[in-house]
Image (spheres, rainbow, N blue to C red):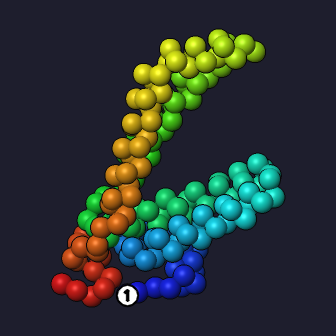
Protein backbone atom coordinates (compact mmCIF):
# COMPACT_ATOMS: atom_id res chain seq x y z
CA UNK A 1 0.00 0.00 0.00
CA UNK A 2 1.74 3.17 -1.18
CA UNK A 3 0.64 6.40 0.45
CA UNK A 4 1.12 10.00 -0.59
CA UNK A 5 1.85 12.96 1.70
CA UNK A 6 -1.77 13.91 2.41
CA UNK A 7 -2.87 10.31 2.99
CA UNK A 8 0.06 9.75 5.35
CA UNK A 9 -0.89 12.81 7.41
CA UNK A 10 -4.50 11.62 7.61
CA UNK A 11 -3.32 8.17 8.77
CA UNK A 12 -0.91 9.83 11.23
CA UNK A 13 -3.71 11.76 12.95
CA UNK A 14 -6.35 9.03 12.57
CA UNK A 15 -4.01 6.69 14.48
CA UNK A 16 -3.01 9.37 17.02
CA UNK A 17 -2.51 6.91 19.88
CA UNK A 18 -2.66 3.59 18.03
CA UNK A 19 0.36 1.49 18.97
CA UNK A 20 -0.93 -1.65 17.26
CA UNK A 21 -0.49 -2.71 13.67
CA UNK A 22 2.06 -1.66 11.10
CA UNK A 23 3.14 1.47 9.22
CA UNK A 24 4.97 1.48 5.92
CA UNK A 25 8.14 3.42 5.25
CA UNK A 26 6.23 5.95 3.15
CA UNK A 27 3.63 6.48 5.87
CA UNK A 28 6.33 7.01 8.49
CA UNK A 29 8.63 9.28 6.47
CA UNK A 30 5.81 11.44 5.08
CA UNK A 31 4.57 11.92 8.65
CA UNK A 32 8.08 12.87 9.80
CA UNK A 33 8.37 15.35 6.92
CA UNK A 34 5.10 16.92 8.08
CA UNK A 35 6.41 17.16 11.67
CA UNK A 36 9.67 18.69 10.40
CA UNK A 37 7.84 21.26 8.27
CA UNK A 38 5.52 22.08 11.18
CA UNK A 39 8.61 22.64 13.33
CA UNK A 40 10.02 25.06 10.75
CA UNK A 41 6.75 26.99 10.64
CA UNK A 42 6.61 27.10 14.46
CA UNK A 43 10.19 28.37 14.62
CA UNK A 44 9.25 31.30 12.40
CA UNK A 45 7.13 32.59 15.26
CA UNK A 46 10.17 32.42 17.58
CA UNK A 47 7.96 31.22 20.39
CA UNK A 48 9.33 28.53 22.68
CA UNK A 49 5.86 28.15 24.13
CA UNK A 50 4.35 27.35 20.71
CA UNK A 51 7.20 24.97 19.90
CA UNK A 52 6.76 23.25 23.26
CA UNK A 53 3.00 22.87 22.76
CA UNK A 54 3.50 21.38 19.29
CA UNK A 55 6.21 19.04 20.56
CA UNK A 56 4.02 17.79 23.39
CA UNK A 57 0.94 17.51 21.15
CA UNK A 58 2.85 15.39 18.63
CA UNK A 59 4.77 13.23 21.12
CA UNK A 60 2.13 10.48 21.30
CA UNK A 61 1.46 10.23 17.55
CA UNK A 62 5.23 10.29 16.87
CA UNK A 63 5.76 7.42 19.29
CA UNK A 64 2.75 5.58 17.86
CA UNK A 65 3.83 5.82 14.21
CA UNK A 66 7.41 4.88 15.19
CA UNK A 67 6.13 1.85 17.11
CA UNK A 68 4.00 0.77 14.13
CA UNK A 69 7.03 1.27 11.85
CA UNK A 70 9.10 -1.00 14.10
CA UNK A 71 6.25 -3.53 14.05
CA UNK A 72 6.40 -3.47 10.26
CA UNK A 73 9.95 -4.86 10.34
CA UNK A 74 9.09 -7.37 13.07
CA UNK A 75 10.50 -5.44 16.05
CA UNK A 76 8.61 -4.98 19.29
CA UNK A 77 7.47 -1.54 20.35
CA UNK A 78 9.73 -1.96 23.38
CA UNK A 79 12.63 -1.23 21.02
CA UNK A 80 11.23 2.30 20.73
CA UNK A 81 11.15 2.67 24.51
CA UNK A 82 14.68 1.31 24.82
CA UNK A 83 16.09 3.58 22.13
CA UNK A 84 14.37 6.63 23.64
CA UNK A 85 15.79 5.78 27.07
CA UNK A 86 19.27 5.31 25.58
CA UNK A 87 18.93 8.65 23.77
CA UNK A 88 17.85 10.34 27.02
CA UNK A 89 20.83 8.84 28.84
CA UNK A 90 23.10 10.29 26.16
CA UNK A 91 21.39 13.66 26.50
CA UNK A 92 21.78 13.50 30.29
CA UNK A 93 25.53 12.98 29.88
CA UNK A 94 25.75 15.93 27.48
CA UNK A 95 23.65 18.34 29.55
CA UNK A 96 25.25 17.14 32.76
CA UNK A 97 28.72 17.90 31.44
CA UNK A 98 27.69 21.25 29.96
CA UNK A 99 25.69 22.22 33.04
CA UNK A 100 28.56 21.39 35.35
CA UNK A 101 30.94 23.40 33.19
CA UNK A 102 28.62 26.38 33.07
CA UNK A 103 27.85 26.43 36.79
CA UNK A 104 31.46 25.98 37.86
CA UNK A 105 32.68 28.70 35.50
CA UNK A 106 30.04 31.34 36.31
CA UNK A 107 30.78 34.39 34.16
CA UNK A 108 34.41 33.64 33.30
CA UNK A 109 34.69 32.55 29.62
CA UNK A 110 38.22 31.15 30.11
CA UNK A 111 37.11 29.09 33.09
CA UNK A 112 34.06 27.92 31.10
CA UNK A 113 36.26 26.77 28.22
CA UNK A 114 38.55 24.95 30.67
CA UNK A 115 35.60 23.33 32.42
CA UNK A 116 34.16 22.10 29.11
CA UNK A 117 37.59 20.77 28.15
CA UNK A 118 37.75 18.94 31.49
CA UNK A 119 34.37 17.32 30.75
CA UNK A 120 35.13 16.43 27.13
CA UNK A 121 35.14 12.70 27.90
CA UNK A 122 31.66 12.89 29.39
CA UNK A 123 30.44 14.99 26.46
CA UNK A 124 31.91 12.49 23.99
CA UNK A 125 30.28 9.53 25.71
CA UNK A 126 26.95 11.34 25.68
CA UNK A 127 27.21 12.18 21.99
CA UNK A 128 28.18 8.60 21.07
CA UNK A 129 25.29 7.15 23.08
CA UNK A 130 22.72 9.56 21.63
CA UNK A 131 24.11 9.12 18.10
CA UNK A 132 23.99 5.32 18.39
CA UNK A 133 20.33 5.43 19.43
CA UNK A 134 19.48 7.83 16.60
CA UNK A 135 21.31 5.84 13.94
CA UNK A 136 19.70 2.60 15.09
CA UNK A 137 16.26 4.21 14.87
CA UNK A 138 16.94 5.54 11.36
CA UNK A 139 18.28 2.20 10.15
CA UNK A 140 15.22 0.38 11.48
CA UNK A 141 12.88 2.95 9.91
CA UNK A 142 14.58 2.56 6.53
CA UNK A 143 14.23 -1.22 6.39
CA UNK A 144 11.71 -2.66 3.95
CA UNK A 145 8.44 -4.09 5.21
CA UNK A 146 8.82 -7.63 6.45
CA UNK A 147 6.52 -10.52 5.68
CA UNK A 148 3.34 -11.15 7.66
CA UNK A 149 4.22 -11.17 11.36
CA UNK A 150 2.60 -11.11 14.81
CA UNK A 151 1.76 -7.41 14.29
CA UNK A 152 -0.28 -7.94 11.14
CA UNK A 153 -0.10 -8.79 7.48
CA UNK A 154 2.44 -7.21 5.15
CA UNK A 155 0.89 -3.86 4.13
CA UNK A 156 1.99 -4.45 0.54
CA UNK A 157 0.22 -7.83 0.41
CA UNK A 158 3.45 -9.70 -0.36
CA UNK A 159 4.12 -13.03 1.25
- Residue located beneath label 1 in the image: 1
Number of numbered discs present? Answer: 1
Q: Is residue 140 left or right of residue 4?
A: left
Q: How many residues crowd around disc 1 within 10 Å: few (fewer than 14), some, or many (20 or more)?
A: few
| Residue 31 in picture, x, y percent from top left | 53, 71
Q: Residue furthest front?
A: 110
Q: Quadrant of the N terminus?
A: bottom left
Q: Position of residue 97 (x, y in %)?
A: 54, 22
Residue occupying the point 52% across, 18% down: 117
Specify whether 130 is left or right of 144: right
Please state which of residues 48 and 71 is positioned toward the viewer in this rendering. 48
Q: Nearer the viewer, residue 128 or 149?
A: 128
Helix, strand or loop status at disc 1: loop
Instruction: Report the residue at 47% width, 71% height from top.
Output: 29
Q: Residue at x 38, y 76 (%)?
A: 24
Vertical order, 49 against 112 (above or below)? below
**Where is residue 137 shown, x and y percent of the image?**
38, 55
Q: Is residue 47 visible?
A: yes
Residue 45 pos. (x, y %):
81, 58
Quarter of the rendering occupied by the C terminus: bottom left
Residue 17 appearing in the image: no
Q: Residue furthest left?
A: 159
Eyeballing the image, is 11 above or below 20?
below
Residue located at (68% from left, 62% from top): 40
Above or below, comparing residue 10 to residue 120 in the picture:
below
Q: Specify the quadrant of the image occupied by residue 23.
A: bottom left
Relative height, residue 45 to residue 29 (above, below) = above
Amino acid sequence: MNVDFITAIKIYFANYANFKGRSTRAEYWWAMLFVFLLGIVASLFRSQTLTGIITLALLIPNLAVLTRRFHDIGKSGWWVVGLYVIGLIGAAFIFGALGTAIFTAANDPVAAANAIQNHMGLLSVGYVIALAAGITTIVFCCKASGPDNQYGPNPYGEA
